[in-house]
């Protein structure tokens, strides 16, 4: 523009820098705390450069666990979180690509009814119907199972809408050409739709993996065995015991471990992440 | 928009829809309708039988001062987080939109908190501001404030607002940046040639053109504070001290779980459903596809 660029750019850099520092500071503290022993943290005067207890803390957290409360090694919790996140991401992609295929490429009685039945679920997050859902999952004998953790959370419309929207942009000529080549519905789905949808699938996968990994209320309700705990639940249980018993160095090491997988996904798949975030909200 | 070319099959489309419809009906419609039904029932003292009591649960709810306090808490919490996070992210997005060298790196450095679980965000912030060991507690005490979010309700709410804002900035930033980048540069250049300074350009051109994004984000942020902050509240305050940070969603959880009052909890769920449906309807009516990416 017409003003001096240099001055404006310096301001911009400063504002962004302050933003980045504020955003990173709480996490930096957690990483710091994971390198000290309990006593250093408890006295309230933790140094701002890392200590030397990292090996000990990470080893104990992953393989042994906190001595009070949960007593479950965090390695197990991470495995549970991973299975849950993968189950939600893959499950949602699977059921929603099939239903979007049906809604877009077929005409059948009750088509719009089916679409609306799915669409309405956009409006009600699991939080408003937790206890009745809990009861149904309990009646089905799914408490403390991966199925119980996963299935209720994939009952939502976002994926179906996303694939529907994408299928609408695929030119009709492609289907006409496939039909001329003698392809049926299954062949068209497998050889044309799936390859074209890879990016959309990947974007949805990234968003759903983060969503699944970060779930809190639902796993809190339906897991009673400590061996089924997810890491996000596990850390909460480590710090709610009496204040003096909280092993902060273990809790903060767990916090760091809980952040690593989803944050890596965002950083290394940033393009897909942004695509998924923007498109699922449309 | 409809497809011209289609497959015809009587049977196949239903099979394709079956998995999603089955899961939706079992884990969505069944529980949602049970919540509505349960909100009209009351259990006896031993939880052995329940009888139909009409709107009794609702009437009882609206006689409770705690329920009004949860409403006020929710209103304060969501307004504060929405205003604060939108303001911060708009500021950051306008700076990042300036074609700076290394702009992409800044973007990455600002968006990753989206991936941090709400409950973990809560743990990070309570650790930072913990009354006895928090790193930032000492400086606050040094200026004469008796900081204690575990005992003081205002401090607890402030801490919740800060952690919820911290987590939401990345999301708002991304959408604001996308909105800013979709504004034609020619319009802004024209204003600059006419002699409008940067601030004037922002308030008379950029901000109005950004309003669909802003409006969309306001609705999304309110929904976020209503539901996704459950983990933050549970990790930081547990609804305390003395219910001063209990929001509507937290109260559904606490009343059903700890109090065992399923009818009252269900009635609260139904009220929440109405609120969310209202918010979503507003979003679809006014925002719809006007948001530009």
Image (cartoon, rainbow, N blue to C red):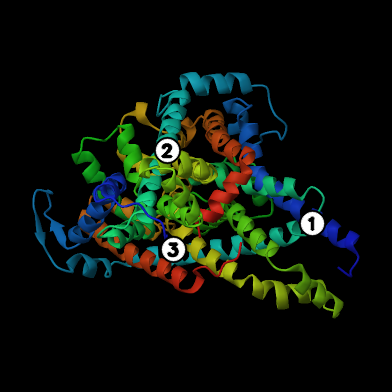
Query: Is residue A44 at least partly visible in the picture?
Result: no
Q: Nearer the viewer, residue A184 or A105?
A: A184
Q: Nearer the viewer, residue A258 or B256?
A: A258
Would you name the residue on which mark 3 appears? B74
Q: In the image, residue A225 lies at what x, y percent?
A: 31, 29
Q: Which mark is residue A90?
A: 2
* Residue appearing at x 60%, y 29% in the figure: A34
Given contact means CB atoms under 8 Å apart, are the residues at marks 1 and 3 in contact? no
Q: Dot 2: what SS?
A: helix
Subunit of label 2: A
Would you name the residue on which mark 1 appears? B99
Q: Dot 3: what SS?
A: helix
* Residue appearing at x 63%, y 40% in the figure: A267
* Direction from residue A140 to residue B212 in the image, left or right: right
Q: Residues within 10 Å of mark 3 (few under 14, many from 20)?
A: many
Q: Residues within 10 Å of mark 2 (few under 14, many from 20)?
A: some
């Amino acid at each position: 523009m017409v003003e001096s660029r240099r001055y404006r750019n310096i301001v911009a850099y400063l504002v962004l820098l302050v933003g980045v520092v504020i955003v990173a500071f709480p996490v930096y503290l957690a990483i710091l705390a994971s390198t000290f022993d309990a006593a250093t943290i408890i006295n309230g005067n933790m140094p701002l450069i890392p200590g030397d207890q990292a090996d000990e803390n990470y080893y104990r957290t992953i393989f042994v666990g906190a001595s009070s409360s949960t007593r479950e090694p965090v390695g197990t919790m991470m495995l549970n979180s991973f299975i849950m996140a993968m189950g939600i991401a893959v499950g949602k992609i699977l059921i929603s690509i099939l239903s979007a295929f049906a809604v877009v490429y077929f005409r059948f009685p009750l088509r719009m009814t089916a679409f609306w039945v799915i669409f309405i679920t956009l409006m009600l997050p699991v939080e408003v119907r937790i206890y009745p859902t809990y009861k149904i999952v309990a009646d089905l004998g799914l408490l403390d199972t991966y199925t119980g953790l996963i299935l209720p959370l994939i009952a939502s419309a976002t994926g179906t809408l996303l694939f529907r929207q994408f299928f609408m942009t695929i030119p009709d000529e492609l289907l006409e050409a496939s039909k001329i080549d003698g392809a049926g519905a299954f062949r068209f789905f497998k050889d044309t739709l799936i390859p074209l949808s890879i990016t959309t699938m990947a974007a949805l996968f990234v968003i759903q993996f983060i969503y699944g990994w970060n779930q809190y209320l639902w796993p809190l309700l339906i897991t009673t065995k400590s061996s089924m705990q997810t890491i996000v639940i596990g850390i909460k249980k480590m710090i709610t015991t009496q204040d003096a018993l909280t092993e902060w160095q273990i809790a903060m090491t767990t916090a760091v471990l809980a952040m690593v997988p989803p944050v890596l996904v965002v950083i290394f798949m940033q393009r897909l992440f942004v695509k998924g975030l923007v498109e699922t909200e449309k | 928009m409809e497809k011209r070319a289609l497959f015809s099959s009587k049977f196949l489309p239903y099979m394709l829809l079956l998995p999603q419809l089955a899961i939706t009906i079992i884990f969505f419609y069944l529980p949602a309708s049970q919540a509505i039904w349960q909100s009209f029932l009351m259990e006896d003292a031993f939880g052995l039988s329940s009888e139909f009591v009409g709107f009794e649960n609702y009437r009882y709810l609206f006689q409770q001062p705690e329920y009004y306090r949860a409403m006020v808490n929710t209103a304060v919490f969501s307004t504060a987080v929405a205003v604060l996070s939108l303001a911060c992210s708009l500021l950051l997005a306008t700076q990042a939109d300036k074609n700076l060298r290394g702009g992409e790196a800044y973007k990455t450095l600002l968006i990753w908190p989206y991936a941090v679980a709400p409950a973990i965000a809560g743990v990070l912030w309570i650790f930072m501001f913990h009354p006895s060991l928090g790193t930032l507690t000492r400086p606050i005490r040094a200026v004469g404030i008796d900081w204690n979010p575990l005992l003081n309700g205002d401090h607890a709410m402030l801490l919740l607002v800060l952690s919820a804002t911290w987590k939401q900035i990345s999301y708002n930033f991304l959408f604001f940046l996308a909105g800013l980048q979709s504004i034609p540069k020619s319009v802004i250049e024209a204003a600059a040639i006419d002699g409008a300074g940067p601030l004037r350009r922002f308030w008379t051109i950029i901000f109005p053109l950004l309003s669909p994004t802003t409006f969309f984000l306001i609705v999304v942020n309110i929904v976020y504070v209503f539901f996704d902050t459950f983990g933050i509240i549970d990790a930081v305050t547990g609804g305390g001290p003395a219910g001063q940070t209990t929001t509507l969603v937290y109260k559904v959880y606490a009343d059903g779980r700890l109090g065992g009052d399923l009818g009252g909890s269900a009635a609260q769920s139904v009220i929440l459903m109405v609120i969310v449906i209202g918010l979503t309807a507003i979003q679809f009516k006014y925002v719809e596809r006007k948001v530009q990416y």
